[in-house]
C-alpha cells in the first residue's frame, strides 16, 4: 500500500483553522485504511494525531520575517537566484528528509505550498500536491482601506498572485475545500482545471469525541456566568475579516437594552489589543470577558458556557468560498449557532436546518438574530437537538475521505 507523505512547517503549538484541517485529513486518511507519514515540527500529541501516523521530524523552521522574504523572493526572483539565497533550506531538507524520501508530497499551509514548489524546482522531490484552504491574494485585496495601508496591501496582492501563478503552474494536483473555490481556480487558472480535487472543510471527529471537563466547567461557570445570565460566545481568530470587533460593538449596543447578557471572547490575532481596549472602555465592561487563546483540547468545555455561539465573519469573496472551521467547531458544541448566510453554506444549512443565519456584515440583523435566539432558546434547542450527531457523522473529515479516492491526486 502506498504511504501518503505530507508536509507542514507547523509545530502545532497553537491550534487554528489550518492545523485543525490537517488533523482532520491525516486522521481521516488513517481511518480510511491508508498509511500516512507526516514531516513536520510537531511534537507527538496522541490526543490529536492518530497513533498510526508515522512522524518524521523536519528539524528546522522559518521565522515570520524569513517566511515573508522567502515567499517574496520566490515570486520575484528566478530560481537560480533563489537557489543561492536559500541553499541552506535545501541542504537541511536533503540531509534530514531527502535521503529517506524523494517522492510526491502533500503540502498543507500557504508557506508549505511554496516550499513544495521550491523543492520540486530543485529536484529534491518528484512532485508536489497542495492542499489549499485559503487565497492570500483575495485577503490582501480587501484589506487596507486607504493611504499607505491600501498601497501596501496592493503590493502584497500583486506579489501573491505572481507566486500563485508559479506554484500552481508546476504542481501535480490541488486539493480545495469547496465547489466555490474549485470554480474560482478554474476561472482564474484554466490550465489547472483537471488538477483540482475536493475535500471539504468539516468537523474534526476529535472535537466530537472530546470529553467535557466538569471540574474545569464548574470553575469557569463560577467565574464567568452569573445567575440567569445569558452568554454570547465567540471562539476564533481576532482578524479583521472575522468580525469580532463588530460583534463586540453589537453586544455593547444590545447591553444598553438588556442586563441579562454577557459576552465571552476566545482567541487572539491582529485585533486582540483593540478588542481589549474597547472592552475596557465600554460601560458594560464588567460583562465582557476577553480570555485570549485556550487549548483546543478544552474547547468543548468552554462551549458549555454558551447560550448562543456567534460566527460573525464579514462579507468577503473568500468567505463566500470557504466555510470557516469555527463554524463546524461551533455546530459540534450542541449549542444554538448564528452565522452569516454565505453562499458556500447554503447547501449545508438549507432552511436554517443547522443554525440561524443573517446577511453577512449586516450588524443590525445580527443583533436582531441574537435577540431572537435568546428569547426562543428552548424552542431552538429542540429544533437543533440532533445537529451535533448529524454534523459529526455527515460533515466529518473521516466521512469525506471514505468517499474520496486519494489515488486520483497522484495520477
Image (cartoon, grey):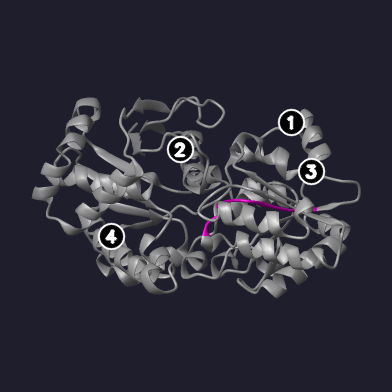
Q: Quadrant of residue 380?
A: bottom right
Residue mark closest to the camera, 3 vs 1? 3
Distance between mark 2 and mark 4 Cα atoms: 25 Å
Q: Is residue 234 magenta?
A: yes
Q: Determine contact: label 2, label 3, CB under 8 Å.
A: no
Residue that badge 2 annotates:
26
Decide which of 5, 356 is in the foreground and name it: 356
Q: Determine contact: label 2, label 4, CB under 8 Å.
A: no
Residue that badge 4 annotates:
164
Q: Quadrant of residue 342?
A: bottom right
Dot 4: within a 10 Å radius of its alpha carbon, few (fewer than 14), some, or many (20 or more) residues? many
Magenta part of the chain: 231-239
| Secondary structure of residue under mark 4 | helix
Distance between mark 2 and mark 3 Cα atoms: 36 Å
Q: Residue at x 52, y 51 (%)?
A: 269
Pointer 2 or 3: first along the chain: 2
Amino acid at each position: 500500500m502506498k504511504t501518503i507523505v505530507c508536509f507542514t512547517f507547523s509545530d502545532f503549538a497553537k491550534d487554528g483553522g489550518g492545523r485543525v484541517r490537517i488533523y482532520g485529513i491525516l486522521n481521516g486518511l488513517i481511518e480510511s485504511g491508508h498509511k500516512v507519514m507526516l514531516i513536520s515540527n510537531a511534537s507527538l500529541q496522541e490526543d490529536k494525531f492518530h497513533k498510526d501516523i508515522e512522524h518524521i521530524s523536519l528539524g528546522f523552521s522559518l521565522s515570520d520575517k524569513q517566511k515573508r522574504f522567502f515567499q517574496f523572493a520566490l515570486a520575484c526572483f528566478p530560481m537560480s537566484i533563489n537557489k543561492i539565497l536559500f541553499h541552506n533550506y535545501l541542504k537541511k531538507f536533503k540531509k534530514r528528509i531527502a535521503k529517506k524520501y524523494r517522492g510526491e508530497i502533500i503540502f498543507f499551509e500557504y508557506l508549505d505550498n511554496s516550499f513544495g514548489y521550491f523543492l520540486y524546482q530543485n529536484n529534491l522531490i518528484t512532485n508536489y500536491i497542495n492542499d489549499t484552504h485559503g487565497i492570500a491574494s483575495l485577503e490582501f485585496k480587501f484589506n487596507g482601506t486607504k493611504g499607505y495601508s491600501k498601497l501596501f496591501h496592493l503590493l502584497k496582492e500583486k506579489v501573491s498572485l505572481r507566486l500563485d501563478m508559479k506554484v500552481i503552474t508546476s504542481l501535480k494536483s490541488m486539493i480545495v475545500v469547496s465547489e466555490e473555490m474549485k470554480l474560482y481556480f478554474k476561472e482564474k487558472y484554466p490550465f489547472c482545471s483537471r488538477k483540482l480535487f475536493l475535500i471539504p472543510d468539516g468537523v474534526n471527529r476529535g472535537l466530537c469525541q472530546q470529553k467535557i471537563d466538569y471540574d474545569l466547567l464548574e470553575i469557569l461557570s463560577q467565574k464567568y456566568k452569573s445567575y440567569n445570565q445569558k452568554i454570547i460566545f465567540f471562539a476564533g481568530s481576532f482578524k479583521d475579516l472575522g468580525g469580532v470587533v463588530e460583534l463586540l460593538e453589537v453586544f455593547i449596543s444590545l447591553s444598553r437594552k438588556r442586563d441579562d447578557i454577557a459576552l465571552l471572547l476566545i482567541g487572539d490575532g491582529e485585533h486582540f489589543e483593540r478588542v481589549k481596549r474597547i472592552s475596557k472602555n465600554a460601560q458594560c465592561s464588567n460583562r465582557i470577558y476577553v480570555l485570549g487563546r485556550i487549548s483546543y483540547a478544552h474547547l468543548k468545555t468552554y462551549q458549555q458556557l454558551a447560550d448562543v455561539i456567534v460566527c460573525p465573519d464579514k462579507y468577503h469573496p473568500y468567505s463566500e468560498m470557504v466555510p470557516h472551521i469555527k463554524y463546524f467547531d461551533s455546530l459540534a458544541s450542541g449549542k444554538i449557532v448564528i452565522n452569516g448566510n454565505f453562499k458556500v453554506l447554503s447547501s449545508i444549512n438549507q432552511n436554517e436546518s443547522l443554525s440561524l443565519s443573517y446577511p453577512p456584515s449586516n450588524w443590525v440583523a445580527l443583533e436582531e438574530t441574537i435577540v431572537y435566539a435568546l428569547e426562543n432558546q428552548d424552542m431552538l434547542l429542540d429544533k437543533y437537538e440532533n445537529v451535533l450527531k448529524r454534523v459529526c457523522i455527515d460533515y466529518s473529515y473521516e466521512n469525506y475521505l471514505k468517499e474520496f479516492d486519494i489515488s486520483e491526486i497522484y495520477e
